[in-house]
Image (cartoon, rainbow, N blue to C red):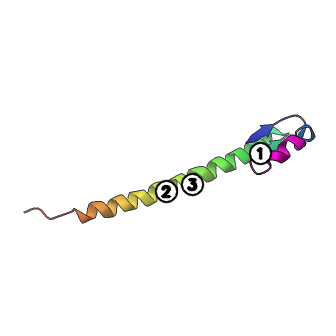
Amino acid sequence: IFLFCGSVSAYTEWAMDYCDKVMIFDHGDDLLERLGKDIQSRLREQATLCLKRADEYKQRALQYKRPCG
């Protein structure tokens, strides 16, 4: 959870209950940088999974490949 606010200190007590899930930002550039990094990481994970599945499907297709005639 990304929380953008004017004063981090106003939310620290509340956020302690969610410290493993919440990141509090009081500057837009910091939030944007972190959000960009998280999106990049997630897209890389998804791309790796897609490439792995593509290789699996390619190997499966090669099992059924037979010469004509």
On whether residue 59 falls in the magenta region, the answer is: no
The answer to whether residue 5 is above or below residue 52 is above
Disc 3 to disc 1, C-alpha distance: 22 Å
| Residue that numbered label 3 is attached to | 44
Q: Is residue 53 left or right of residue 39?
A: left
Residue range corresponding to the magenta coloring? 12-21
The kind of residue on which mark 1 rests is Val
| Residue that numbered label 2 is attached to | 49
Taking the view exactly as shown, the residue that stands out farthest to the left is 69
The answer to whether residue 61 is above or below residue 14 is below
* Local secondary structure at mark 1: loop
Could you say which is closer to the camera, residue 2 or residue 27? 2
The answer to whether residue 10 is above or below residue 61 is above
The kind of residue on which mark 2 rests is Leu
* Local secondary structure at mark 3: helix
Percent across and percent down for residue 21 are 74, 47
Taken as a whole, is the magenta stretch helix, strand or loop? helix
Disc 1 to disc 2, C-alpha distance: 27 Å
Dividing the picture into quadrants, the one containing residue 35 is top right
Q: Quadrant of the C terminus?
A: bottom left
